[in-house]
Amino acid sequence: MPILNQLITTILPFIPKTIVGQVAKKYIAGVHLSDGVRVAKNLNGNGMKTTMDLLGEDVKSAGEAELIKNGIISIIQSIKENKLDSNVSVKPTQLGLKIDKELGYLNLKKIIEEAGRLGNFVRIDMEDASTTDDTLAMYRRLCSDGFKNIGVVIQSYMHRSEADVRALVKNRTNIRLCKGIYNELPSIAYKKKQEIRDNFLKLLKIIIENGSYAGIATHDDYLIDHAYEIVQKYGLGKQQYEFQMLLGVREKRRNSIVSDGHNLRVYIPFGEQWYAYSMRRLKENPHMAWYITKAFFVH
């Protein structure tokens, strides 16, 4: 199977953009802000919260970072105007973190200020391991500046995550817990499926036991079922946690989580960078890439 996965990854760049788009459209709201708003309204109407995510990361210029900052501020304003039950997620590298840390911080601060003014919340996303320290330092600086409408992401496959969580819960940090998707070295990340699962559940218990808000971000039935048990064991109210899923993924299970009485948030990616985003995600997910490869040869 690894050989097949490698072959699929090699073939992907040669598959027409239109075919990639046909498969990806289930997982991406579209190109424009209006597409994200439309999808968010529909999900809100079905009892689900949302997070809107403007695609793009690791920008190369301050001008590009400025455009993305303004785009995210427009999302926050549109959420207010359309009375959506939604917030936003941002990647530090799309705001200039790798160009200049101060530039990235100031861009992020502007977004959080506008979100605060409009009564909204900003999730600071976690990227590859090279950015973890800087991302958490950015979060701590924002907290010291008095911002409270922010949260972070922790990836359970990282060896360091337990220490990070234990430090974060001291301040009741709002934490989105996920497995992690970047291809990290075995020296810093767990690689075995059950190891990642076990650490996820260990971290979730630490988050809950210390009174932090838990965003339980997973599509894994094993983790969802165990999270149900943890929620029940600790007698959590709906204001203390939520489940989170990506747009277009495990929709039947998503609906059942809502039917079972839990809060659920759907991440809605959109924007002009949909193709680059899709290709990166497909390379990380050969199973989905296989469907596109088959579509290419059947087309």
Image (tube, rainbow, N blue to C red):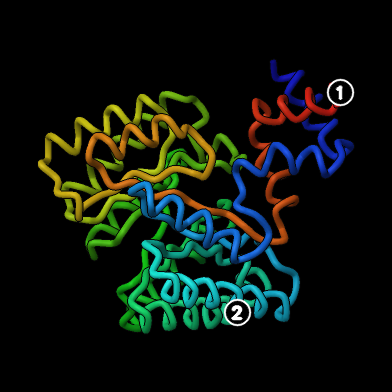
Q: Quadrant of the C terminus?
A: top right
Residue 255, position as x, y percentages in the image = 37, 36
Q: Gap in Å between the C-alphas at discs 2 and 1?
A: 41 Å
**Circle number at residue 297:** 1
Considering depth in this image, is 136 or 176 the residue closer to the camera? 176
Considering depth in this image, is 22 or 203 the residue closer to the camera? 22
Q: Amino acid at mark 1?
A: Phe
Q: Judge whether 27 appears above or below 69 on screen.
A: above
* Residue under numbered circle 2: 70
- The residue located at (47%, 73%) in the rendering is 76
SS at circle 1: helix
The reply, left or right, for residue 283 in relation to residue 84 is right
Considering depth in this image, is 164 or 214 the residue closer to the camera? 214
Q: Amino acid at mark 2?
A: Asn
**Circle number at residue 62:** none
Q: Residues within 10 Å of mark 1 (few under 14, many from 20)?
A: few
Residue 278, position as x, y percentages in the image = 69, 45
Q: Quadrant of the N terminus?
A: top right
Q: Which is more N-terminal, label 1 or label 2?
A: 2
